């Protein structure tokens, strides 16, 4: 691919992207109250989905069993120095073998939906060619167990584990990867579509392209501006092609994409700050929504023209995909000015209570509702680590997490009252798992996992969430 110069320098773009990536990757402790907020009682709509979410590499393990190919995260974690703890996802939560136990745990909690992901290299070890029946059989067993437990399966076709063979051939910056992904989507829907009604195409495409190809802190660990720009266009093409591939086989399927979003605040109301905030929103929150719903990229990157993405004639018709729903992955708010960007955790001027009120989830939902003709929305709460550990009685008292979750659910209930069509809420994750560049250092699950024995111990937040799911009410 040709490198085309444009007015924004690589250094400037990389600097801005690192700041935004940090803003969406930080868990700002100042946002969480030390005790749960005042008790309220709010009923959620009938049929509301209560679930958990996880990526295949985070929980499955069995990294080279039953014909699975190598993924970019297998290669990345097996390279010294890439994960700060030196951890890998080789075993993770061993859900590949223990899926029945985890499904039973979901059932015991009263959950009625599960957002998981399908590992592309389990289905096509090299990312193309014939299907791997043993890999497909695993997902058939998992889905059958979920359905038997009356839990709605919602698989994501891609949660960051690209087959390494495709990365060796160029990865997401290479245009051909879009067609390879559509072929893979066709296999999945033909093999599993009799069991499924809903699909997610991607999980957080802005994050995996930015951190994987621009910043380099996630797999495959590349850091090149042009690789990044080409990758986001290839991913948009893949999203549109996969949408059509699924609908061609299963027209009634509900198809969406999961997008990380962070409400953008400004330190002042001056025009320059507001413009900077809007550019940030368009770039990092809705880049792929604009492509899917409107067949265009936002004019948000100063000095970057469509040809810098590798856009060809007819491409923008291909990227259009009238998604049936939007899976909003909620991140802490970002504070943006014309000269700087930082997460809310960097602001020491606000009290904890004020920061909780200004988390921005309600505002983010309403912005998407207004700008995209009131789409169906399902919210996934990004996992947060609060440093809790089991006590002498093997109990995990994580009251801070309960307070945080309660506030986010208040945000959602207010958005529903304001007219948003929110139909589900997912916590990441059911269990502690592999947290990407942080390895197992962070514990974000509703159940604590002893990775030496794989024993699951339900945290207090898990019991609280179970009561919420069973009653469909925030008490």
Image: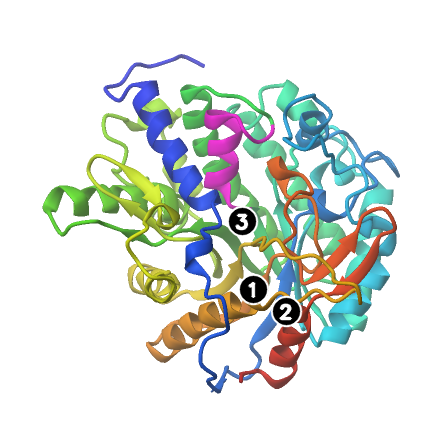
Q: Which element type, helix, strand or loop, lies under badge 2?
A: helix
Q: Which element type, helix, strand or loop, lies under badge 1?
A: helix
What's the distance in space between the residues labelled 1 and 3, CA to CA?
Answer: 36 Å
Closer to us: 72 or 439: 439
What's the distance in space between the residues labelled 2 and 1, CA to CA?
Answer: 7 Å
Nearer the camera: disc 1 or disc 3: 1
Task: Specify whether 339 is left or right of 148.
Answer: left
Q: Is residue 393 above or below residue 317?
A: below
Question: Can you identify the residue that label 3 sits on?
Answer: 243
On the image, the x and y values in percent for residue 76 come to: 67, 26
Task: Determine the residue positioned at 63% across, 75% down.
Answer: 464
* Magenta stretch: includes residue 205: yes
> Which residue is the extreme one toward the left?
270
Task: For residue 296, say whether it is visible.
Answer: no
Q: Quadrant of residue 253?
A: bottom right
Task: For residue 264, say whether it is visible.
Answer: yes
- Estimate how packed mark 2 is, as few (under 14), some (14 to 19) or many (20 or more) residues with alpha carbons within 10 Å: many
Question: Can you identify the residue that label 1 sits on?
Answer: 401
Labels 2 & 3 near each other (Cβ < 8 A): no
Q: Is residue 284 above or below residue 177?
A: below
Q: Which element type, helix, strand or loop, lies under badge 3?
A: helix
On the image, the x and y values in percent for residue 142 come to: 80, 58
């Amino acid at each position: 691919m040709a490198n085309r110069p444009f007015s924004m320098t690589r250094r400037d773009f990389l600097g801005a992207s690192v700041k935004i990536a940090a803003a969406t990757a930080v868990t700002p402790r100042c946002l969480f109250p030390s005790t749960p907020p005042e008790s309220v009682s709010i009923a959620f709509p009938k049929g509301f989905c209560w679930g958990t979410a996880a990526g295949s590499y985070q929980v499955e393990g069995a990294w080279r069993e039953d014909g699975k190919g190598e993924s970019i995260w297998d290669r990345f974690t097996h390279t010294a120095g890439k994960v700060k703890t030196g951890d890998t996802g080789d075993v993770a939560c061993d859900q590949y073998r223990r899926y029945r136990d985890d499904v039973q745990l979901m059932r015991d909690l009263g959950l009625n939906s599960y957002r998981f992901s399908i590992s592309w290299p389990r289905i096509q070890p090299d990312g193309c060619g014939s299907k791997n029946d043993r890999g497909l059989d695993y997902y058939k067993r998992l889905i059958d167990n979920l359905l038997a437990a009356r839990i709605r399966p919602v698989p994501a076709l891609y949660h960051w584990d690209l087959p390494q063979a495709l990365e060796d051939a160029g990865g997401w910056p290479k245009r051909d990867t879009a067609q390879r992904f559509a072929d893979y989507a066709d296999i999945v829907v033909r093999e599993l579509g009799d069991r499924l009604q809903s699909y997610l195409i991607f999980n957080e495409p802005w994050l995996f392209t930015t951190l994987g190809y621009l910043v380099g802190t996630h797999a495959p660990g590349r850091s090149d501006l042009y690789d990044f720009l080409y990758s986001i266009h290839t991913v948009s093409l893949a999203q549109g092609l996969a949408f059509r591939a699924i609908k061609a086989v299963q027209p009634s399927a509900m198809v969406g994409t999961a997008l990380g979003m962070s409400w953008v605040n400004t330190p002042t109301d001056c025009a320059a700050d507001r413009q900077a905030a809007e550019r940030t929103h368009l770039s990092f929150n809705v880049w792929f929504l604009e492509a899917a719903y409107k067949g265009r990229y936002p004019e948000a990157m100063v000095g970057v023209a469509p040809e810098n993405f590798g856009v060809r004639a007819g491409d923008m018709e291909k990227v259009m995909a009238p998604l049936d729903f939007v899976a909003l992955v909620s991140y802490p708010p970002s504070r943006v000015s014309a000269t700087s960007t930082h997460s809310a955790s960097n602001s020491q001027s606000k009290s904890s209570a004020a920061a909780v009120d200004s988390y921005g989830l309600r505002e983010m939902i309403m912005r998407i509702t207004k700008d995209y003709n009131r789409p169906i929305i399902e919210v996934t709460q990004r996992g947060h680590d609060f440093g809790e550990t089991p006590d002498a009685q093997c109990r995990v008292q994580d009251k801070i997490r309960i307070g945080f979750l309660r506030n986010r659910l208040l945000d959602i209930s207010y958005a529903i009252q304001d007219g948003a069509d929110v139909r589900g809420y997912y916590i990441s994750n059911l269990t502690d798992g592999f947290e990407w560049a942080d390895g197992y250092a962070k514990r974000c699950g509703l159940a604590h996992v002893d990775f030496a024995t794989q024993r699951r111990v339900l945290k207090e937040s898990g019991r609280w969430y179970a009561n919420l799911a069973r009653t469909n009410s925030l008490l």
